[in-house]
Amino acid sequence: MDALDEWTMEHLQNYLGLIEKVQPFVEQGLNADPPFRQLQIRVDWKNAGSPCALTVILANEKLEGRTKRASTGCRWTDDAYKLKTRLYFWLVERYGLEARYLPISHRQKRSEYQGA
């Protein structure tokens, strides 16, 4: 077993947990009118010893945004970035989302979509 396989096995529960948290949020965005098809994911660092989180940002053609924050379960940012990359490509492939840099303020939209 190579290092990548060992890493994947070690973090599989974290990855599956992220998918479980983010998937309903993405599906809800795709069903909106107009649909939220543009995707950006950001790693949020936390205090030392706390798990890192990912913020998934979706936007529609009007650049209206929705955000969803989910813990990665990872204490190291390197692991969080690997999970981010895997989640990013899985969402793009599964849902046909567009990879974008979105000029949407997370703080501005967070209160609107906290429960999404």
Image: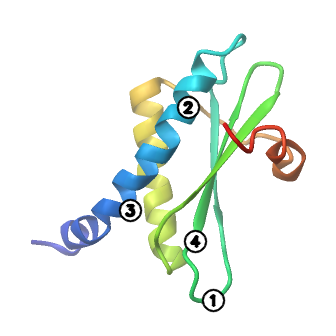
Q: Which numbered marker is on residue 109?
A: none
- Quadrant in which residue 43 is drawn: bottom right
Q: For numbered disc 1, what is the local secondary structure?
A: loop
Residue picked out by circle 1: 48
Up the image or down, 81 lies above or below 28; here it is below
Q: Give the mark nearer the N terminus: 3 vs 1.
A: 3
Which amino acid type corresponds to the residue marked 2 in the rendered image?
A: Val
| Residue 14 spot, x, y in % from top left | 38, 62
Q: For numbered disc 3, what is the local secondary structure?
A: helix
Residue picked out by circle 3: 14
Q: Give the mark nearer the N terminus: 2 vs 4.
A: 2
Residue picked out by circle 2: 26
- Residue at the limit of the structure toward the top, as seen here: 33
Query: What is the CA distance from the residue labelled 3 to the residue labelled 1?
Result: 19 Å
- Residue 75 is left or right of residue 53, and the answer is left
- Quadrant in which residue 2 is drawn: bottom left
Q: For numbered disc 2, what is the local secondary structure?
A: helix
Residue picked out by circle 4: 52
